[in-house]
Image (spheres, grey):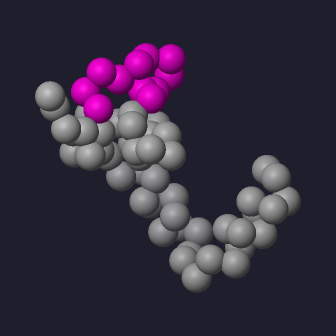
Amino acid sequence: MDDSISSKIASLDVPYNKIIEYFRMKCRTCGHQRIAHNELEKCEGVMNKPCTSGCDKFISE
């Protein structure tokens, strides 16, 4: 892991297990873990399977 990322994580006032718990939460819309979502909160799928259901902030047209 990049040293700057490690230092940023270490400086957070959030226990590591709470960070892991957050990313293991499943999206209410697609059911994938949040770790499968990109920085725009769009689900990119898991294990090379793309997600077509969007994410928590998905707004259908």
Location of residue 42 (image quadrant): top left
Q: Residue 2 at x, y = what percent? A: 82, 52
Image point 50% across, 17% down: which residue?
A: 48
Location of residue 21 (image quadrant): bottom left
Image point 50% across, 46% down: which residue?
A: 39
Q: Is residue 45 above or below residue 41?
A: above
Q: Is residue 43 above or below residue 34?
A: above
In the picture as drawn, the residue positioned furthest to the front comes out as: 61
Quarter occupied by the C terminus: top left
Queried whether the magenta region covers residue 24, the answer comes back as no
Queried whether the magenta region covers residue 46, the answer comes back as yes
Q: Is residue 34 above or below residue 31?
A: below
In-front residue for pair 60/36: 60
In-front residue for pair 32/41: 41
Q: Main secondary structure of the magenta part?
A: loop
Image point 79% across, 50% down: which residue?
A: 1
Decide if residue 39 is on the left or right side of residue 43. Answer: right
In the picture as drawn, the residue positioned furthest to the right comes out as: 3
Using the rendered image of the protein, determine whether residue 56 is visible from the camera's viewpoint: yes
Decide if residue 31 is on the left or right side of residue 14. Answer: left
In the picture as drawn, the residue positioned furthest to the bottom comes out as: 13
* Range of residues picked out in magenta: 44-54
Q: Residue 25 at x, y = what percent? A: 36, 52
Q: Residue 51 at x, y = what percent? A: 35, 23
